[in-house]
Image (cartoon, coloured by chain):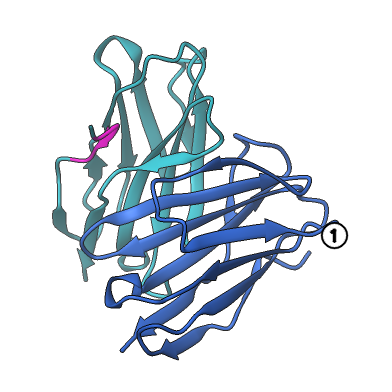
Amino acid sequence: KAGVTQTPRYLIKTRGQQVTLSCSPISGHRSVSWYQQTPGQGLQFLFEYFSETQRNKGNFPGRFSGRQFSNSRSEMNVSTLELGDSALYLCASSLEPREKLFFGSGTQLSVL
Amino acid sequence: AQKVTQAQTEISVVEKEDVTLDCVYETRDTTYYLFWYKQPPSGELVFLIRRNSFDEQNEISGRYSWNFQKSTSSFNFTITASQVVDSAVYFCALSESDYKLSFGAGTTVTVRA
């Protein structure tokens, strides 16, 4: 069974641009969540989707948004990038909420 | 307020030594789940164990064991007979009723040959 796939693996952007990250969950998993990892703040929850519905959002500005499609694939978008958005963005999927999460390898975003 | 506290920032041991990682959590929920994840240098978080708040039975799985004590809100994790491949950052996490994981800051474990 294929694991959680995140694309792209690395991304370099400049301030003010926007970016879209993609996540394909494990087949059959309906819950997809996103986390931001930085050396200073650690792992922080961004949002969680289940059957195309966002059920919870972390404490991030409105520039961070996401969506989930009917095939459970998910995207997250960050508009008007800031230097502080440089981070590893991790996507995770699970069969049901609160089951063990399976994480992808992440997208390393660098904002210059 | 930090919901999950991992007081140990770094631990360095020699191969075959045991390593115990401390985790203290804070929640008002009566039903919650606790996890341990490992993050090797490759970056992918790897699931290790999951316990629910109603099951305080401590278990051993291979070289891994855990000690869950509700009375002290602690969920400690032990690696027995450590190996170099165990070198990684270990995260304790809490799942409450809000569909998210709250992670601790992580403990970097270095196992020297």
Q: Position of residue B50 (x, y in %)?
A: 51, 34
Give the camera-side residue of B63 and B102. B102
Left or right of A35, for residue B18: left
Using the image, name the chain to which the residue with label 1 belongs: A
Magenta residues: mostly which secondary structure? Answer: loop
Give the camera-side residue of B17 and B32. B32
Q: Position of residue B95 (x, y in %)?
A: 48, 32
Q: Is residue A11 above or below residue A62?
A: below
Q: Residue A58: say if magenta.
A: no
Q: Colour of chain B?
A: cyan
Amino acid type shown at disc 1: Asn
Quarter of the N terminus of chain A within the rendering: bottom right
Give the camera-side residue of B89 and B17. B89
Left or right of B105, for residue B100: right
Q: Secondary structure at mark 1?
A: loop
State the residue at coordinates (71%, 37%).
Answer: A96
* Start-end of magenta stretch: B2-6
Q: Is residue A94 above or below residue B35?
A: below
Residue at the disc numbered 1: A71
Q: How many marks?
A: 1
Task: Examine the rendering and report whether any part of residue B35 can be seen.
Answer: yes
Residue B24 is drawn in which quadrant?
top left
Q: Is residue A81 above or below residue B7?
A: below
Left or right of A17, for residue B22: left
| Chain letter for the part of the structure drawn in blue | A
State the residue at coordinates (36%, 62%).
Answer: A37
State the residue at coordinates (32%, 45%).
Answer: B80
Q: Position of residue B15 (x, y in %)?
A: 23, 61
Q: Is residue A1 above or below residue B53?
A: below
Quarter of the C terminus of chain A within the rendering: bottom left
Give the camera-side residue of A105 and A79. A79
Q: Position of residue A33 (x, y in %)?
A: 58, 51
